[in-house]
Amino acid sequence: MILAAGRGMRMRPLTDTTPKPLLPVHGRPLMQWSMDALARGGFHHLVINTAWLGEQIEAHFTAWPQQHEGVALCFSHEGQDFGYALETAGGISRALPRLGEVFWVLAGDVYAPSFEFTQASVDRFVASHQLAHLWLVPNPSHNPQGDFGLSEDGQALNAAPVKFTYSTIGLYRRELFELPWFDTVPGNPQGTAAPLAPLLRRAMDAGLVSAELYTGPWTDVGTPERLAELNAN
């Protein structure tokens, strides 16, 4: 699942007329870098949630599946269905009927051109008892305190003296978005908006979230300046 529903307020005025995931980085829409990487890794069923200017995202990628044999796209149009974005956990819950028991989740506004989505990563996760597996990155200047800790045995920690930043790339079990962890009906028919971080922190405290550190190129494209810097290099 690729998260592409946000308004991108910090990217204004660029996002007044273009959804942030469609802003170009080195000649490709930002979100397409991850889409192409998923297809290369053999992951052929992609779900994209949208809200702000979501019709542009669907229109832009109409022909994209034809460039990748066996790939299918479907959309969870939160803006059309409810008039607003459902935040990360709410959006995932809305899309659950379109997802499997285990699935990738990543943000459409993060640039990680060297990240590899592999079946081996999925297999290791499936063989574990974890509800989520996160890729963390060294803290960028705009998030110096980080988000989560990382234990020596690969557990993500809610509280730790040293924290890293969540890359927004992770593997998840649908179980995390069902009772008793999440009290919204799968499919989220009522349109409940809910963030992901509190849900992850509860699962971390139960020892059910693993993690690893990713040190390849990674940028949270959150401002016009970061976008300009990426395109200048």
Image (tube, rainbow, N blue to C red):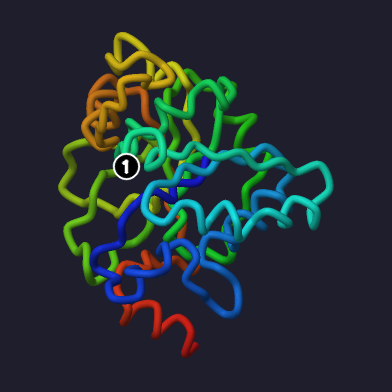
Residue positioned 31% across, 27% down in the render: 191
Q: Nearer the viewer, residue 159 or 27?
A: 27
Q: Position of residue 11 (x, y in %)?
A: 30, 71
Give the total of numbered labels: 1
Q: Residues within 10 Å of mark 1 (few under 14, many from 20)?
A: many
Q: In front here: 39 or 151?
A: 39
List x then y, in percent, for residue 67: 80, 57
Residue drawn at x 84%, y 48% as measured from the top left: 69
Please report the residue visible at 40 percent of the width from the left and 64 percent of the height from the top.
Answer: 20
In the displayed orientation, state which residue is furthest to the right: 69
Quick check: 160 above or below 62? above
- Residue in the image at 21% along x and 62% along y: 143
In the figure, residue 47 lies in which quadrant?
top right
Q: Position of residue 1 (x, y in %)?
A: 52, 40
Q: Is residue 221 above or below residue 45?
A: below
Tell me the residue that label 1 is attached to: 85
The amino acid type, in three-letter code, at marker 1 is Ala
Closer to the camera in the image, 65 or 103: 65
